[in-house]
Image: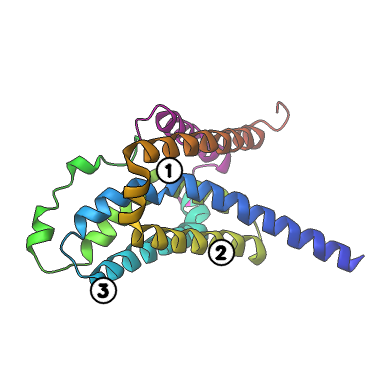
């Protein structure tokens, strides 16, 4: 009986990690930041490019870890119920998904054209641009942070919290690999390929958002849903 429970528990955690990784993948979407990364690191040595990518991805992991641990406490401090935040976050994520499926990108992330990177190319390499704007808000913005808080508010216990942190570590490593291969990915996919990938991720994100909204409704109206 104990072995059966242990197997079921491990399988549940593994499934949860995969689901969270999927949500992070489509929300953080490192492919949307490839052009900005190439612009920010133009003229940099390979070593400095690696440093920018490492700092950006470390920032993503730290952000995910912070809101995983402190997210629910922040909601309680502000007097916001978990159900209300789930519903609001689900709607936000759904709007993001709609824009991605329409080929309009993520509405809560800034347009890359608004960033002036000329000063970066003329100045010595700096890691500040790896944090802002590359990591925040270009890669992990309001949608990603909201999703982290929503998932962390639904779990209890070290094992389930660890699942979110493991998913955050995995997506951070994936972002690092994507940034380091930015030039090859951009040449291989081109604008059309990246646009198609964004639309596919938008469809997946829409499914995630509906699940978040339904969970929020269940929390707020347990007798109706």
Q: Does residue 4 appear to the left or right of 47 in the view shown?
A: right
Depth check, mark 2 against mark 3: the one in front is: 3
Q: Which secondary structure is most common in the magenta stretch? A: helix
From the viewer's side, name the closer residue of 109 and 112: 112
Residue 9 in the image: state x and y as whole percent. 77, 60
Q: Residue at x 73, y 55 (%)?
A: 12
Q: CA distance from mark 2 to mark 1?
A: 19 Å
Q: Which residue is mark 2?
A: 166
Q: Residue at x 66, y 34 (%)?
A: 218
Residue 129 in the image: state x and y as whole percent. 22, 59
Say which element carries label 3.
helix
From the viewer's side, name the closer residue of 29 and 63: 29
First in sequence: mark 1 or mark 3?
3
Q: CA distance from mark 1 to mark 3?
A: 31 Å
Depth check, mark 1 against mark 3: the one in front is: 3
Q: Which residue is mark 1?
A: 143
Q: CA distance from mark 2 to mark 3?
A: 27 Å
Residue 64, can we see it? yes
Say which element carries label 2.
helix
Depth check, mark 2 against mark 1: the one in front is: 2
Q: Residue at x 43, y 43 (%)?
A: 143
Q: Which residue is mark 3?
A: 47
Which contiguous range is marked in magenta? 77-105
Q: Quadrant of the C terminus?
A: top right
Q: Is residue 191 above or below residue 76?
A: above
Residue 151 in the image: state x and y as whole percent. 57, 50
Q: Is residue 191 above or below residue 60?
A: above
Q: Is residue 161 above or below residue 151?
A: below
Q: Tell me, yes or no, whether the highlighted magenta stretch contains residue 176.
A: no
Say which element carries label 1.
helix
Q: Tell me, yes or no, whether the highlighted magenta stretch contains residue 102.
A: yes
First in sequence: mark 2 or mark 1?
1
């Amino acid at each position: 009986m104990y072995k059966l429970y242990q197997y079921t528990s491990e399988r549940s955690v593994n499934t949860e990690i995969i689901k969270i990784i999927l949500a992070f993948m489509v929300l953080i979407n490192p492919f949307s930041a490839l052009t900005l990364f190439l612009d920010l690191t133009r003229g940099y040595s390979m070593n400095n490019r690696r440093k920018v990518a490492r700092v950006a991805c470390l920032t993503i992991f730290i952000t995910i870890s912070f809101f995983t641990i402190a997210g629910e406490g922040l909601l309680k401090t502000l007097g916001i119920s978990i159900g209300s935040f789930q519903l609001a976050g689900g709607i936000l994520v759904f709007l993001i998904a709609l824009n991605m499926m329409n080929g309009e990108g993520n509405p809560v992330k800034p347009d890359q054209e608004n960033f002036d990177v000329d000063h970066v190319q003329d100045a010595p390499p700096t890691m500040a641009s790896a944090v802002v704007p590359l990591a925040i808000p270009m890669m992990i913005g309001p949608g990603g942070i909201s999703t982290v808080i929503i998932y962390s508010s639904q779990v209890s216990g070290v094992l389930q919290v660890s699942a979110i942190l493991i998913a955050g570590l995995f997506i951070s490593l994936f972002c690092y690999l994507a940034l380091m291969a930015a030039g090859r990915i951009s040449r291989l996919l081109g604008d059309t390929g990246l646009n198609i990938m964004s639309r596919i991720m938008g469809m997946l994100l829409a499914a995630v958002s509906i699940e978040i909204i339904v969970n929020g409704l269940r929390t707020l109206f347990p007798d109706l849903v």
